[in-house]
Each structure stands twice: as C-alpha cells, then as structure tokens.
Image (spheres, grey):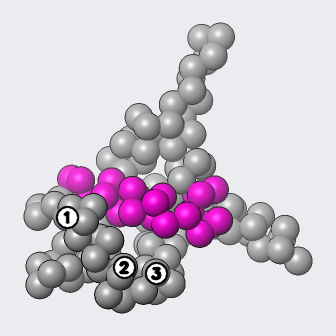
Amino acid sequence: MELTINGKQYVFIFGYRFIKELNKKNEVTERGMTLKAGLDNALMNFFSGDIETLVEMLKTANATENPRVSEKGIVEWIEENGIDMLFDLVLEELKKSEFTKKKTLNFEKEVNKNLQ
C-alpha cells in the first residue's frame, strides 16, 4: 500500500515483519507458554474503529521501508483526508497479505455476525 504524505510517497507492507513487530508489543507469557497476540489485539481495536491502533499499525507496516513516515505525518494525512478511507485501505491490504489474510477475514466474519 502506498500513501502520499506531505508530497512524499510512503510504502506500507503488512507482511511477516509487521506480524513480528506487533507480536513483540503484545506477547503474553504464563506458565512457560507464550501467546503471540499482536495481530489479534490490533484487529480487535482496528475493527472497533480505534484511530490510535490504525496509526500504530501504519507506523509498524512502514517501519521496514524507506522513507519512514512519522506519526505526525500520518495524523496530518488523516486530518486532511479523513479516517474512513484510510480504514478501508488498510482493511483491504490486511485481506490481501498472506500473513494477515486468514485472521483478518475470520475476525471480520465474527464482527459482522455479531452485528446482525
């Protein structure tokens, strides 16, 4: 996924490194077992419409790319362009990536089922 922010083109990759970084931030160890809850936690907050989670997901997806976008840059883009389109763009990317597709589709299915 690419976004133009303040005249610069930024790339966002929702791949293996994205998952690893999310898991580093959301790892739970109990009784010798480690649960990697990064994507699960992010999706739960993402589907509830949490903007901070969206910004963090974008920062993480861009962390392995050059140039790197700042949090301020993402926030300014949101202020100029609105949030709905960005949620939609990220959701489509999460559905396309082989690393996030299965969990995203399952989570979306559960959310839609609970809304009925």
* Residue 72 image point, x, y percent: 25, 66
| 8 falls in the magenta region | no
Query: Please, what secondary structure does the residue beneath circle 1 have?
Result: loop
The magenta-colored residue range is 43-64
Within 10 angstroms of label 2, few (less than 14), some, or many (20 or more) residues?
some
Which residue is labeled 2 in the image? 78
Which residue is labeled 3 in the image? 83
User: What amino acid is labelled 3 in the image?
Assistant: Ile
Mark 2 or mark 3: name the one nearer the start of the chain.
2
Mark 1–mark 2 CB contact (< 8 Å) = no
Q: Distance from label 2 to label 3 (Cα)?
A: 6 Å
Identify the image quadrant of residue 29: top right
Q: Which mark is residue 44?
A: none
Q: Is residue 66 left or right of residue 40?
A: left
Between 94 and 59, the one lying in front of the other is 59
Between 4 and 94, the one lying in front of the other is 4
Identify the image quadrant of residue 106: bottom right
Q: Is residue 65 visible?
A: yes
User: What amino acid is labelled 2 in the image?
Assistant: Ile
Q: Residue at x 83, y 74 (%)?
A: 115
Query: Please, what secondary structure does the residue beneath circle 3 have?
Result: loop
Magenta span: chief secondary structure: helix
Which residue is labeled 1 in the image? 69
Q: Residue at x 20, y 82 (%)?
A: 4
